[in-house]
């Protein structure tokens, strides 16, 4: 089965606009009112530069005050290989959670700096040959470096500036869209919508 997927290159102009548009598209295709909660599942560890994408996104989103929106994973409390199953078990506390899974990954050299937003779960640790449970109704991955050899060392030697750029785009796009869907003040997004439409047309 082919799952719907979009991708954004953060090194090109206006990555926030494209990510916001594509995330909304994927979110709308999969989310409906039957879900009780939205859980943003940010996977990774702050002990590795390349693998800290998820915790950085969680750190930037953890103070978001939206009803029934929860963030698992941050710089202070990362979700990683050793505690992943514990956090997965916590999902059972919600009647029917919609899970947005976020993680770093390795890829081809010409795809470094891309963000992928797709339907379906991601499998944490696959890039470094770890077998961990899959998670997510939809998933977001940021390609932080090149795959194929010495993956753990490659993650340790990833540029922090790239990871920060990926985290800023992902967290900003998610925050904007979830405020748009669940926020108490719809006018909050009106000006941003106008700017996005203007920049797409120019």
Image: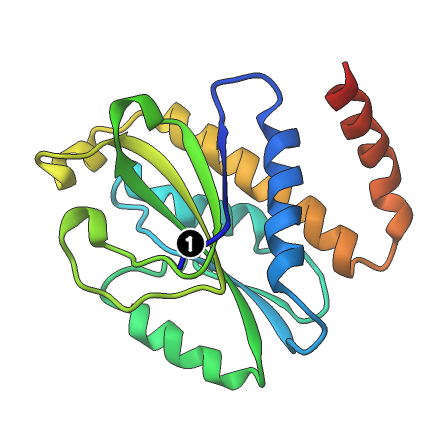
**Coloration mode:** rainbow
Dot 1 surroundings within 10 Å: few (below 14), some, or many (20 or more)?
Answer: few
- Circle count: 1
| The one of 123 and 103 positioned closer to us in this rendering | 123
**Residue 24 image position (x, y, % from top left):** 66, 48
Q: Is residue 180 left or right of residue 43?
A: right
Q: Quadrant of the C terminus?
A: top right
Residue 14: quarter of image: top right
Q: Is residue 82 left or right of residue 111?
A: left
Q: Residue at x 35, y 28 (%)?
A: 160
| The one of 17 and 83 positioned closer to us in this rendering | 17
Q: Residue at x 51, y 85 (%)?
A: 93
**Residue 113, placed above or below residue 118:** above
Residue holding disc 1? 2
Q: Residue furthest left?
A: 150
Q: Quadrant of the N terminus?
A: bottom left
**Residue 165 image position (x, y, % from top left):** 48, 28
Q: Secondary structure at mark 1?
A: loop
| The one of 144 and 48 positioned closer to us in this rendering | 144
**Residue 48 image position (x, y, % from top left):** 25, 41
Q: Residue furthest front?
A: 1
Q: Is residue 198 left or right of residue 112?
A: right
**Residue 192 image position (x, y, % from top left):** 80, 34
Q: Residue furthest top?
A: 202
Q: Residue at x 87, y 34 (%)?
A: 191
Q: Residue at x 23, y 54 (%)?
A: 125
Q: Residue furthest right?
A: 187
């Amino acid at each position: 089965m082919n799952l719907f997927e979009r991708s954004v290159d953060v090194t090109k102009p206006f990555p926030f606009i494209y990510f916001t548009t594509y995330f909304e598209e994927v979110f709308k295709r999969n989310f409906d009112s039957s879900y009780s909660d939205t859980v943003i599942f940010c996977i990774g560890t702050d002990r590795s530069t390349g693998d800290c994408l998820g915790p950085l996104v969680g750190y930037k989103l953890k103070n978001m005050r939206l009803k029934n929106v929860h963030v698992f994973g941050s710089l202070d409390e990362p979700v990683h290989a050793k505690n992943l199953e514990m956090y997965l078990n916590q999902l059972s506390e919600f009647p029917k959670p919609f899970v947005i899974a976020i993680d770093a990954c390795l890829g081809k050299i010409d795809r470094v700096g891309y963000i992928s937003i797709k339907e379906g779960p991601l499998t944490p640790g696959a890039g470094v040959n770890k077998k961990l449970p899959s998670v997510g109704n939809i998933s977001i991955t940021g390609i932080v470096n090149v795959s194929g050899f010495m993956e753990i060392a490659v993650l340790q030697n990833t540029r922090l500036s790239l990871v920060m750029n990926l985290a800023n785009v992902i967290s900003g796009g998610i925050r904007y869209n979830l405020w748009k869907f669940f926020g108490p003040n719809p006018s909050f997004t009106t000006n941003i919508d106008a700017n996005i439409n203007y920049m797409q047309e120019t």
